[in-house]
Image (spheres, grey):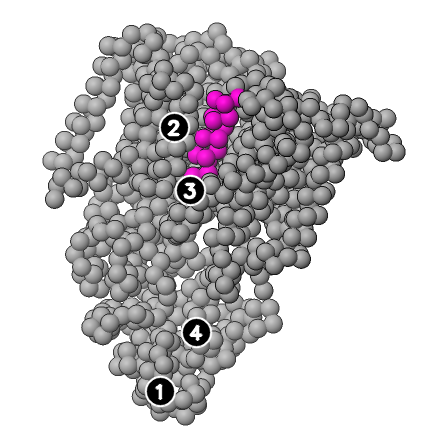
Amino acid sequence: MPGASRVLAWLAAIVAASALAFWLGGYATDVYRKMLIWIALALSYNFLFGIAGQVAFSHFAFAGVGAYAVVILAHKIGLPFGIAFIGALALCALLAYIVALPATRLEGFYLALATLAFSQLVLVVIDEGGSLTGGTGGIANYRLPPVLGFAIRGPWYTVLLVLLVALTLWTLVRLDHSAFGRACRAIRDNAVAAAAMGVDVRRVKVLAFTLTSTLAGLAGIAYAYVDNVINPSVFGLENIFLLLFMIIIGGSGSHLGAIIGAIVVYLAPFLLEPIVGHGFLVVFGVLVVLTILFQPAGLAGLLTWRAARQAT
Amino acid sequence: MIGGALMAVSGLTKRFGGLTAVEGLELELLPGEILALIGPNGAGKTTTFNLIAGVFSPSAGSITLGGVRIDGMPVHQIAALGLMRTFQHNMPFAGMSLTDNILVGRHTRLRASLLDILLGRRRFREEEAAARRRAAELVALVGLREEVDRDVSALPFGEGRLLELARALAGEPRIVLLDEPAAGLTQPEMARLAATIRDIAARGIAVLLIEHDMHFLLPLAHRVVVLNFGRKIAEGTPEQIACNAEVIEAYLGGAVGSAAGRPGHA
Amino acid sequence: MEDLPELIVSATASGCIYALVALAYLLILRPTSVINFAIGEWAATGAFIGVAVLTPLAWPRLEGPYWLALVAVLVILGLLGWLVEVVTVRPLIRRGAGITSPILALLGVLVIFRESLTMLFGADPLPSPPPFGFKRVALGPFAGASQQFLIIGATFAVFVAVWLFFERTVWGRAFEAVALNRRAAALIGINLRRVTALAFAAGAMVAGLAGLLMTPLTSAHYMMGLPLAIQGFTALVIGGVGRVEGALLGGLLLAFVEQLGARYLPIPSGLTLGFPFVLLIVFLFLRPGGLIAPREAC
């Protein structure tokens, strides 16, 4: 049965990725955890940008809202963690919906600018939040409370992040291979024809934006407990560019591309910095330009092209 | 409304600023009927088409489909009611496979909710499988070649036209609007298309088409409506129209049976 | 309220810088429909060229005359703008790749420029001397630094020149024609490639000029590009993406709201940093065409 072998493949991947958590030392664990968060963000952003065709710059803002919301609810206000978690997620979803309603009326790059402006406003609000948000210094000195009696520490938290990535990927792949995913791609390719085929363009756009931004919020919640420190700079503009570059270089519209792009762009600085110092960003810029010019399908496109060639 | 009419257009008028594109149009379409809309360039055919498809709202008049008023309704709702259309210039979804393109046409028939999709419930899986089977049937019906996962942007023009048709049919419509479906096709492709349209109509689907090519139209259409300057100037069987003096005059030159009305011809 | 005239001078000077950046966007946007977000980095490049020519703080440490800096900025940025167009934008437009691809490619260019500036000039802010000295100038009740008046004067000169270019010269007409209808313009014989190349070069030069003019007041530093790009785009949206005058109006309006709001509104000063973003959002929704309606194709 094809279904069973696919489930086995998923389980094998999850187990392997989790086993890695137990094998890595302290510093490498931090790198691995952050990479997992980036992969989760890249997957949801790929759906929004590559599949639904919405050029939005608000992804990190929603991650920030998720992170700050859970920390404030659980540690500043002192709610039980379960409630804080659900509350933070609900807040992200609600905010994403409120932003989506007007934002999806804008086309192309005007959507990008509006969501950029929104992100910067979120940052300003966080910076000026006084003792509630910790201002520019952020919030520290909190820990993940025991969940269902278990204190999730060390490698087990990394396993949780692996599960986060798996959940994100599974959700997005499911949505992709359905009428909803096809509607998103159809709107991206030709919104007029999509409407003529019966797609409620407005509704699908709002749904895509809300769902992916909520997933970003979820990744943000997970991020809050990686360093047990959050501050506004993490959710700034630089990272949105990096995320965008991950998607472009990896292959826009492909889940595999998002994963590859995230891994490559995240790990490359560690390898390149000893050689070119800060110049690795120039490398990314050049790679982005080259990808758009010569290989729009990105690294994932290279892989599938090679696989297709080997098959013939 | 005359009993039995699937779609009825009454007093349809559309003004763009000072220009009246369509005026006082009366039209009816029965299930399984093939109605051709003809007229010189600028006669208002495309505007009428776009009014029925929901791209514009009329300035006056009404359009009903199965008794329901559809004028002023959003395009996607009209599609959900069973009215599908093709475009004059191929508008494929370039980033999707052939099958997926056709499946988008089926969008309104797929009822699985987001939850069904996420949980992989049986309702969703069965619906998808049935939809894919239907897409394969449509590929065969319209005469597209087999390889269903081809890169759509590389499709030759004639096959692009066929994809338009297959996509519109995927929604199991009650009525299809075809905008110059034969334009740019070779003779054998046109013959195949005519056979397909007859097949569709025989299944009870009403067909409204705009065409310039009389050789294609006359043996195919049950009825012909002629527009000029936004008004209906004649209506009847193809034979009646071909002999109608007013119509011949409207086309200014040559018997209506010639290809003179076709753009691109000398 | 005593410092209102000074505030007006300050806001006008800032507004002029925003206006120049908005103009740079517009020069590129109108004929090509491409939003070139790298404009901010071009302004930063102009700023750093100024430092390099006028001061001993950066290679080649010329400590030269002002006109040399001006020429260097215009020539170098003109060349860079033209180069970027040829290498990244032209192949995409020729391929018919739509509008999003060039814009994204230009984001890559943005990063390339910014990191290159960082590598060449370091992370510290570098000031350059105002050509008319540090003394204060007064025009009636309006007093301010000499540089502020230079900015205002230079900006008005640039706007007049551009306006004359569009209204009175054959090349300017060609620009407008391409902006209104690319295909028709090509059909009547206008060389699209040349217009596009000129648009990018001109946009780069105007942006570089903005950077050069603002450096005596704000110093050149590697992070200056992006905020400037956002503010310039906000000014463009406010003023209307169609008309040259709109860029000036938008820039001034943005600066006045920013500075007068920060000074007189009873809200914490940190929040006033949000003004440009609120304005951008408001204008994107309420008046996507901006305050001044563009010329429509008939």
Which residue position is annotated with label 1? Answer: B256
The picture places residue A205, in percent across and down from the top left corner, at 43, 43
Disc 2/disc 4 C-alpha distance (Å): 55 Å
Disc 1/disc 4 C-alpha distance (Å): 17 Å
Q: Chain of mark 1?
A: B
The picture places residue B185, in percent across and down from the top left corner, at 27, 70
Which residue position is annotated with label 2? Answer: A283
**CB within 8 Å, label 4 to label 3:** no
- The residue that appears at 23% across and 35% down in the rendered structure is A303
For discs 4 and 3, the disc positioned in front in the rendered view: 3
Q: Nearer the viewer, residue C146 or B162?
A: C146
Which residue position is annotated with label 4? Answer: B45
Helix, strand or loop under label 4: helix
Which residue position is annotated with label 3? Answer: C87
| Looking at the image, residue C61 lies above or below residue C66 | above
For discs 1 and 4, the disc positioned in front in the rendered view: 1
Which labelled disc corresponds to residue B113?
none
Helix, strand or loop under label 1: loop
**Chief secondary structure of the magenta span?**
helix
